[in-house]
């Protein structure tokens, strides 16, 4: 049961199932890989892909903002308790 939770806990925090989260994360990774290749080419040939990197960043940010808006906000008391637990774990 603990092993299954390792695959489902984080996706649940962003309002997704495991498969939905996998699809979203793979989409992000493919966008980042494609834009990284374009940025590397741009480093040598600056007249190519002049806006690809910044456009990819803007696109990924907008996708994250849209996804977050689907998840109900965590109550403030619970959020601060989670923050305290994280801070204690990090110490």
Image: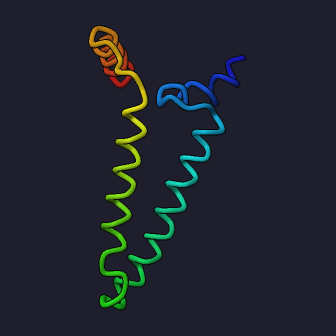
Task: Give left or right: position of 14 versus 65.
Answer: right
Residue found farthest to the right = 1
| Front-most of residues 40 and 87 | 40
Q: Position of residue 63 (x, y in %)?
A: 41, 48
- At 37% from the left and 33% from the top, the residue drawn is 69
Identify the image quadrant of residue 42: bottom left
Q: Position of residue 21 (x, y in %)?
A: 57, 39
| Front-most of residues 66 and 31 | 66
- At 30% from the left and 81% from the top, the residue drawn is 50
- At 32% from the left and 12% from the top, the residue drawn is 75
- At 38% from the left and 64% from the top, the residue drawn is 56
Task: Give left or right: position of 36 versus 57.
Answer: right
Residue found farthest to the top = 77
Q: Position of residue 8 (x, y in %)?
A: 62, 27
Q: Position of residue 43 (x, y in %)?
A: 34, 83
When the figure is inspected, residue 84 is found, relative to residue 48, above or below; the finding is above
Picture colour scheme: rainbow
Give the number of callouts.
Answer: 0
Task: Give left or right: position of 31 versus 80.
Answer: right
Q: Quadrant of the C terminus?
A: top left
When the figure is inspected, residue 27 is found, relative to residue 90, above or below; the finding is below
Identify the image quadrant of residue 4: top right
Q: Quadrant of the N terminus?
A: top right
């Amino acid at each position: 049961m603990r092993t299954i939770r390792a695959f489902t806990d984080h996706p649940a925090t962003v309002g997704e199932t495991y498969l939905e989260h996998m699809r979203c994360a793979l989409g992000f990774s493919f966008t980042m890989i494609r834009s990284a290749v374009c940025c590397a080419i741009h480093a040598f040939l600056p007249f190519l892909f002049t806006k690809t990197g910044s456009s990819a960043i803007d696109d990924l940010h907008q996708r994250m903002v849209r996804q977050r808006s689907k998840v109900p906000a965590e109550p403030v008391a619970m959020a601060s308790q989670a923050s305290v637990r994280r801070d204690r774990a990090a110490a």
